[in-house]
Amino acid sequence: MNITRRQFVFGAGASAAIMHLPVAKAALNNPQTIDLQAITGATQLLPEKYPKTPIWGYGGMAPGPTLRVRQGEKLVCNFINDLPQASTVHWHGIRIDNKMDGVPDLTQALVPSKGQFRYEFVAPDAGTFWYHPHNKTSEQMARGLYGALIVEEKSPPEVDQDEVLMIDDWRLGQSGQIDDSFGAMMDWSHGGRLGNWITVNGNARYQKPVKQNERLRLRLINTSNARIFSLLLNGLEGWVVALDGQPIETPFEESKPLDRLSLAPAQRIDLIVDVTAEEGTEGVLYMPGRNGDHTLAVFSVDGKARPAPLPTPKPLARNPIPEIDSAAQARKVFLHMEGGAMGQMRGAFLGGKRVGMRELVNAGKVWAFNGQVEMPEKPLISAARGETLHIEIKNDTSWPHAMHLHGFHFRKLAENGRFGPLRDTLLMDREETATIAFVADNPGKWLLHCHMLEHVSSGMMTWIEVA
Ligand SMILES: [Cu+2]
């Protein structure tokens, strides 16, 4: 049987295996110490009649183990690199000690194949975070290297089940192997490496048994290289309670009913939902599409947990993030994004020299920030500790981008002068201009880049320095 790419995406659903994510359970002792080994493995991504897919994974699995720590608790992670490539671990969304941020050359040396590195940090914020490599990321993540890092609230909301749903978009070949077309200019200069096989926690049709009127916390994490998901729920009703790990501040009543959920690469959405589907039916998480809906996760309802849903939950407690004083003097800096297919870019600085588009394409560098491809020698901004920064980002390209700032959560400035919710990754539409604001309270060297991994590989990155 020949499987076309299209059938892969939209004909999924034959695999109904239930997979429980292995959990490294939060121990009572603090710090919590774990070994995290990156190694090759194999997993059944396709239905059983197809061979297993060779992957690279933490613990040899994709996703890797879900790490759980309590807010304020220290995690000590002995990273063991048994991959054939050098790697590092980035703790996405954690307001971390800069030395532990996992960015090669900026915050640490690469961990070579057969090497080790000891990560040690306190998780200051409760919420849904994740970890992934930060070297050859477009290849290493496409091969399956990622896992969830859950920081538990001191008093968590009352739910019956707390589920992490890591949504990935694989590009698989005919025999289920990971397509090794890494570095294809078509992907790099367009919308990134889009796949043909979508999974939740490694399952093409993730299944979870539930009861009617049960309350679930669903932690959605987009681990794909470049796909922006637009998702809907059916038979599950509730609230968005956090974005990118940070609790939302709008009252829950205003966020009901749940609208379409937009999840760009690296973004997270925490939901609290009640199972409203009838007994014997299903709740579903799905991608609506012109050619039919594509189901990602099925919640089959067996039995009744209680006669009626629980009352509206209380908002999650805020994390200790310094609030932006809108009256404070802010340092302003401009970031011009350009390049890519159908763009206006004619040339840019590469390795200290201005070169034309042909030379950039030959070097595999097709995106620029402020006329510079790849990491500039000097930071975009050198800030004093505690300064308020406004970065005005102009997406002067024909493609959407998912801009991720390390070390901080920021707010997008709205037209009315108000601030949006805290985020660490901002989806920017083509031609859109947005200003992000944050207090630079965390010293160190912090990356600012597109989280569409082919875009960062081909130039879209810069950094800021906080003294
Ligand atoms: Cu991008």
Image (cartoon, grey):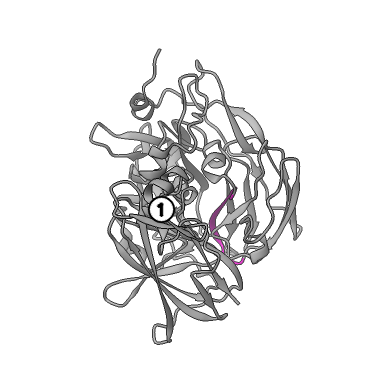
Q: Which of these two is toward me, 258 or 424? A: 424
State which quarter of the image contains the N terminus: top left
Q: Which quarter of the image is occupied by the C terminus?
A: bottom right
| Residue positioned 75% across, 40% down in the render | 114
Count neighbours of disc 1 (C-alpha within 10 A) and say few if under 14, some if 14 to 19, many if 20 or more: many
- Find residue 184 and report its horizontal and vertical position in percent: 44, 36
Q: Is residue 126 magenta?
A: yes
Mark count: 1
Which three-letter amino acid code belongs to the residue tagged 1? Trp
The residue at 50%/52% (across/down) is 159
The x and y percentages for residue 145 are 58, 41
Camera-side residue of 452 and 237: 452
- Compared with residue 394, is residue 140 higher up or lower down, i.e. above or below? above
Boundaries of the magenta span: 124-134
Which percent across, then down, holds residue 417?
30, 78
Side of 140 where 213 appears, left or right: left
Asked whether the viewer can see residue 406, the reply is yes
Label 1 residue SS: strand
Residue at x 61%, y 27% (from the top left corner): 42
Residue of label 1:
367
Residue 288 is a magenta residue? no
Classify 284 as above or below 308: above
Q: What x and y, as percent, mark residue 48?
A: 51, 19
Tell me: is circle 1 under 8 Å from ligand 1. Answer: yes
